[in-house]
Image: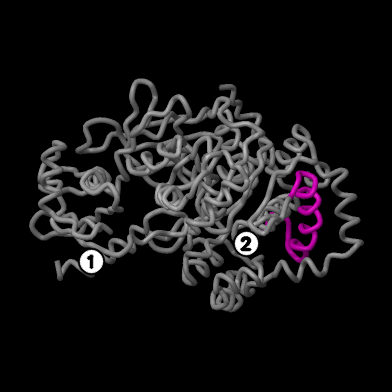
């Protein structure tokens, strides 16, 4: 691998220009569910034309909210704002009104770009109305820009100006004051620990992580690949891995507005002959089960992140003839930290670390091997923006990001995730990994989805509750599975709560706060 951190010393827009130079302006690179198609040239021109309209009345370096699904227009909007030296804040439209309004206040968003069609389809009218009434720290309220209105205002003159700028796009862009170290995007955490935190990623973060991924793949990815991306771009996995990395390396990206359409997505994958898919374990199960005939036959491999890959998922895709590559990342790292590879895929691990990263393992009391993972490198964020200090970026200490995950690294560099530090319970003086107990439940009932939560217990300090969608799940079966697997009975959850469905967030991750709330509500009845 030949990753050189200095090679990422560019803005995202400059990296797009470089990709166009390598692969040709006529190369088709974006397609969406509405059959909108963009070549490098059309993406560049569209960005320069739209950017002039979107940034009118704003200042260089200003953060502008974006409330859009995975469509070609979102890609154009993202690069348009970057081209004109503005910073898109991608709002999680599944997060609910409270969190979206909080994000607007935290990032000091005076302007939010959206679409009437999307607002209507997603039933976000009340959210938009709440944003318009929101007073930002400056005292100004949020201004809403609808892409439909912008498009109707673009005439021959605006197109001519954009075309002229495209001829000296790099020079024009550099005059906007943006550089590699400037913020390129603001993403938001899910708000599981209170109000959402803004994660500020720089241009270098995004370009570097895109390069790290491509070079780590060591020939497994190429410009001939067709990437299918149903993951929302407000999630860093969908933004960098599913969109920016392919675009900067000449791949054709098929965007889809929601990962929840289990029947439609396999058919589109078959129609487009997509070769690479980025998704989560939950979504991969849904696609494999809904696929018919040769829908997924073109898929060379799928890359799974955001949650642990279960054995049943691998079996479903093995039957199709497609390898599941499990990876690992964090929004704060733009996001990819490690990933398995074709021909070097060690099940049960998340692969080896990407090039260019420094790693430190901090010992954790009660954990015999491994430690709490900290990473430093060109893809590590500029910092957090917190609700209590709107607009102020708090950088990571010494450039190190504490992932909060407890991991073990073997002699060959493969990483095993033992669990979140916050997802360990202390029961009878022993540290118990909730993720390990979930694996135990998955062994007992492979077809189900299982989440273990820990709640306070007056006698043992904490107690475990298994929340599962497996009807008839029985504690005696779990005890037998624990004995067969060599797990102490102390690890077996005290109660089992059967639900119709495990709560899932828009990114595909299990909604742990919502699942814990279900367990708290049900505990008196168990």
The correct choice, above or below, for 185 with respect to 151 in the image is above
**Disc 2 and disc 1: Cα gap in Å?**
35 Å
Label 2 or label 1, whichever comes before in sequence order:
2
The correct choice, above or below, for 470 with respect to 151 in the image is above
Q: Which mark is residue 520?
A: 1
User: In the rendered structure, does residue 215 fall within the stretch colored magenta?
Assistant: no
Point out the image quarter for the N terminus: top right
Instruction: Report if the CB atoms under discs 2 and 1 are less than 8 Å apart.
Output: no
Count residues near mark 2 (Cα–Cα under 10 Å), then give few for <14, some for 14-19, many for 20+. Answer: many
Residue 91, x across and y down, in percent = 56, 61
Q: Mostly what secondary structure, the magenta segment?
A: helix
* Mark 2 lies on residue: 66
Judged from this view, the residue extending furthest toward the front is 293
Determine the residue positioned at 13% across, 54% down: 475
Residue 140, x across and y down, in percent = 64, 74
- In the figure, is residue 385 to the left or right of 252? left
- In the figure, is residue 498 to the left or right of 253? left
- Residue 273 position by quadrant: top right
User: In the rendered structure, does residue 52 fall within the stretch colored magenta?
Assistant: yes
Q: What is the magenta range?
A: 38-62
Q: Secondary structure at mark 2?
A: strand
The correct choice, above or below, for 51 with respect to 349 in the image is below
Q: Nearer the viewer, residue 7 or 290?
A: 290
Residue 389, x across and y down, in percent = 50, 61
- In the figure, is residue 460 to the left or right of 452? left
Q: Secondary structure at mark 1?
A: helix
Judged from this view, the residue extending furthest toward the left is 459
The correct choice, above or below, for 521 with respect to 189 in the image is below
Determine the residue positioned at 55% across, 52% down: 267
Q: Nearer the viewer, residue 193 or 69?
A: 69
Q: Is residue 87 visible?
A: no
Residue 468, x across and y down, in percent = 26, 57
């Amino acid at each position: 691998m030949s990753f050189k951190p200095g090679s990422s010393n560019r803005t995202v827009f400059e990296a797009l220009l470089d990709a166009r130079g390598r692969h040709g302006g006529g190369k088709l690179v974006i397609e969406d569910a509405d059959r909108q198609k963009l070549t490098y040239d059309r993406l560049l021109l569209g960005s320069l034309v739209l950017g002039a309209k979107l940034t009118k009345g704003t200042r260089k370096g200003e953060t502008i909210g974006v409330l859009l699904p995975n469509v070609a227009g979102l890609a154009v909007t993202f690069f348009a704002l970057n081209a004109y030296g503005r910073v898109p804040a991608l709002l999680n439209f599944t997060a609910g009104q409270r969190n979206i309004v909080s994000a607007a206040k935290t990032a000091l968003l005076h302007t939010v770009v959206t679409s009437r069609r999307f607002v209507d389809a997603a039933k976000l009218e009340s959210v938009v109305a709440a944003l318009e009434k929101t007073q930002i720290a400056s005292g100004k309220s949020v201004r809403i820009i609808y892409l439909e209105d912008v498009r109707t205002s673009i005439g021959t003159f605006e197109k001519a100006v954009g075309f002229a700028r495209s001829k000296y796009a790099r020079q024009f862009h550099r005059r906007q004051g943006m550089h590699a170290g400037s913020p390129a995007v603001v993403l938001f955490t899910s708000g599981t620990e209170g109000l959402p935190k803004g994660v500020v990623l720089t241009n270098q973060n995004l370009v570097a992580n895109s390069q790290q991924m491509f070079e780590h793949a060591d020939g497994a990815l190429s410009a001939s690949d067709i990437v299918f991306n149903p993951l929302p771009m407000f999630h860093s996995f969908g933004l960098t891995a599913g969109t920016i990395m392919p675009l900067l390396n000449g791949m054709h990206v098929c965007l889809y507005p929601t990962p929840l359409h289990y029947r439609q997505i396999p058919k589109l994958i078959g129609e487009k002959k997509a070769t690479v898919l980025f998704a989560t374990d939950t979504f991969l199960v849904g696609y494999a089960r809904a696929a018919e005939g040769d829908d997924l036959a073109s898929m060379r491999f799928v890359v799974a992140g955001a949650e642990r890959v279960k054995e049943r998922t691998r079996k479903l895709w093995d039957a199709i003839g497609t390898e599941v590559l499990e990876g690992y990342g964090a929004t704060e790292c733009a996001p990819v930290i490690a990933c398995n590879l074709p021909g070097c895929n060690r099940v049960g691990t998340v692969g080896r670390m990407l090039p260019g990263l420094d790693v430190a393992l901090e010992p954790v009391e009660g954990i015999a091997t491994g430690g709490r993972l900290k990473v430093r490198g060109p893809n590590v964020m500029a910092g957090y923006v917190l609700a209590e200090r709107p607009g102020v970026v708090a950088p990571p200490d010494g450039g190190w990001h504490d992932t909060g995950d407890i991991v073990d690294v073997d002699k060959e560099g493969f990483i095993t995730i033992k669990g979140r530090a916050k997802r360990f319970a202390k029961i009878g003086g022993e540290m118990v990994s909730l993720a390990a107990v979930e694996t135990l439940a998955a062994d007992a009932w492979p077809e189900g989805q299982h989440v273990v939560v820990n709640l306070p217990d007056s006698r043992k300090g904490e107690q475990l509750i298994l929340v599962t969608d497996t009807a008839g799940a029985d504690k005696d079966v779990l005890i037998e599975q624990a004995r067969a697997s060599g797990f102490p009975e102390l690890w077996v959850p005290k109660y089992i709560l059967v639900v119709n469905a495990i709560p899932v967030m828009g990114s595909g991750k299990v909604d742990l706060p919502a699942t814990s709330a279900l367990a708290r509500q049900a505990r008196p009845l168990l």
